Image: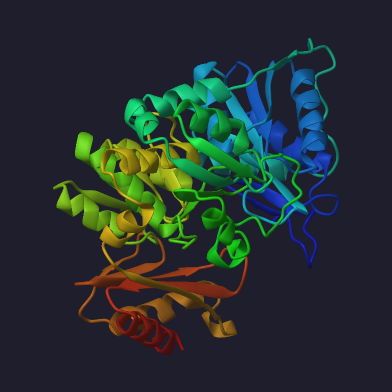
């Protein structure tokens, strides 16, 4: 936590980025200091910047671009752009790195920064720690640029067409065009429509987009959960669509609903996308350790390995590179296909699902029904003072002892696996709580596992 944090609305600064309330803990000065620290870690070359549709985005982008050019850096400004598009442009243009201005699924009063390496992926934990150390060493105030340095220039660039081409190359475009599915899409007044509209039109879809204007005027809370989307689901059936898609504001996550407007959830997105990739090119799969076991079950069916990573996109990408994964992602609707970019990407997720509708003659409902049927529950437990900090280790040990039939892993918190189910207990980085996630093939088994873990924690 940094010195700008306030008791009610703290500025969250971590190895994976920065997030805060604009005008309170997050100001242009804070953003510039963070980017200054980031730029100091980069090799020579241009820096790509982009933003989702939030109304604070232009102010932050202008301040960041001005400072980077004062440092002598060329800036490639993508304007409103999806987070995966920034990764594509960084790699495509041979940039030194990238900055996406977005608070992802957080409410409109927030904004934040996500950082990309020259490989077009989010920073590794080690690289993020280096930026964080630099940021914390700067103190308060606007960092100065060299007085004798030559100013860089700003080049406007739209990476949407390149992104569309990469996604389209991964699927059977002609089959989708023959099927001509009708797609209802909620881009949530974020950046998603910038790639979604040209992509879906290129695939020959009939397209109905709501929330397509990237103005940050969210019609609902922006995280694409069942509760937040309940008011929109009837619109899918009302327009006669074959499928409903929902993006978060920076379009790295996708949730899916059936033609009848039944929300099948973010956890199903990766599982639905994995099947056609493994059918064509079997290979290792990577998910984080809190992702549904549906994907692992599909991997087993194809005779390939499914590797677990720590929670967090950077950790998933690290493991994908280590094992040569053909696809990976997270259960929050984030699909990572290395053929496109090593970033969670709602667009490749859409295209892979549409390919299945076309080539399998299926409906979203039938595809969802054919998935391994699992029940997942998530809860959180407030930690007593004695369980906070180092004291949590004793609580986790008690939970492990309460599940003698399970195999234990300390990869990220405590994960317990047994035939037909698993449970994960992780401490929050920002609150005195632990989050408990459990999944099994029956609701009663899930509820019993969570109750046993909570009781053991004490």
**x, y (%) of residue 404?**
22, 81
Residue under the image location 40 percent in, 87 percent down: 451
Q: Which residue is drawn at 80% across and 62% down?
A: 6
Where is residue 199 shown, x and y percent of the image? 50, 30
Quarter of the image where one finds residue 93: top right
Whether residue 250 can be seen here: no
Say if 108 sits above or below 88 in the image: below
Q: In this view, does 168 lie above or below 258?
A: above
Q: In this view, does 299 lie to the left or right of 237?
A: left
- 183 vs 144: above or below: below
Residue 268: give x, y in percent of width and height. 38, 57
Residue lying furthest left: 303
Q: Which colour scheme is used?
A: rainbow
Q: Nearer the viewer, residue 242 or 229?
A: 242
Q: Which of 447 and 218 is in front in this view?
A: 218
Task: Using residue 146 as the reference point, say whether residue 430 is left or right of it.
Answer: left
* In-image side of 385 versus 77 (left or right): left
Residue 114 in percent (x, y) is at: 61, 40
Q: Quadrant of residue 251?
A: top right
Query: Quarter holding the N terminus?
Result: bottom right
Report the number of numbered marks. 0
Q: Is residue 311 visible?
A: yes
């Amino acid at each position: 936590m940094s010195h700008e944090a306030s008791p009610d609305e703290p500025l969250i600064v971590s190895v994976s980025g920065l997030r805060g309330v604009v005008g309170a803990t997050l100001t242009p000065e804070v953003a510039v200091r963070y980017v200054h620290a980031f730029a100091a870690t980069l090799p020579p070359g241009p820096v790509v910047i982009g933003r989702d549709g939030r109304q604070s985005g232009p102010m932050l982008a202008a301040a960041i671009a001005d400072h980077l050019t004062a440092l002598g850096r060329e800036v490639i400004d993508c304007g409103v752009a999806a987070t995966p598009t920034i990764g594509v442009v960084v790699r495509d243009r041979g940039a030194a790195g990238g900055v996406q201005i977005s608070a992802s699924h957080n409410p409109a009063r927030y904004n934040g920064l996500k950082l990309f390496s020259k490989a077009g992926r989010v920073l590794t934990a080690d690289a993020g720690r280096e930026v964080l150390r630099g940021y914390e060493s700067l103190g308060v105030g606007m960092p100065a640029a060299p007085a004798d340095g030559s100013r860089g220039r700003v080049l406007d660039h739209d990476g949407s067409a390149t992104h569309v081409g990469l996604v389209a190359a991964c699927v059977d475009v002609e089959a989708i065009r023959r099927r001509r599915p009708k797609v209802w899409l909620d881009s949530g007044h974020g950046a998603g429509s910038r790639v979604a509209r040209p992509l879906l039109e290129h695939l020959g879809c009939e397209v109905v987009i709501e929330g397509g204007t990237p103005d940050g005027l969210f019609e609902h809370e922006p995280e694409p959960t069942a509760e937040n989307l309940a008011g929109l689901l009837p619109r899918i059936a009302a327009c006669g669509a074959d499928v409903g898609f929902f993006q978060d504001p920076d379009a790295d996550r996708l949730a899916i609903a059936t033609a009848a407007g039944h929300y099948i959830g973010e956890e199903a997105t990766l599982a639905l996308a994995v099947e056609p990739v493994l059918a064509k090119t079997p290979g290792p799969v990577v998910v984080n350790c809190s992702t549904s076991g549906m994907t692992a079950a599909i991997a087993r069916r194809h005779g390939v390995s499914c590797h677990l990573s720590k929670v967090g996109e950077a950790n998933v990408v690290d493991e994908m590179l280590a094992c040569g994964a053909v696809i990976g992602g997270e259960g929050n609707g984030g699909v990572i296909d290395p053929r496109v970019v090593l970033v969670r990407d709602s667009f490749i997720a859409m295209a892979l699902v549409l390919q299945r509708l076309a080539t399998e003659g299926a409906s979203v409902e039938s595809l969802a029904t054919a998935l391994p049927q699992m029940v997942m529950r998530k809860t959180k437990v407030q930690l007593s003072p004695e369980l906070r900090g180092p004291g949590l280790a004793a609580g986790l040990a008690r939970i492990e002892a309460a599940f003698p039939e399970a195999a234990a892993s300390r990869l990220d918190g405590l994960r317990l696996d047994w035939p037909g189910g698993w449970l994960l207990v992780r401490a929050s980085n920002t609150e005195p709580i632990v989050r408990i996630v459990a999944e099994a093939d029956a609701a009663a088994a899930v509820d019993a596992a969570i109750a046993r873990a909570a009781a053991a924690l004490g």
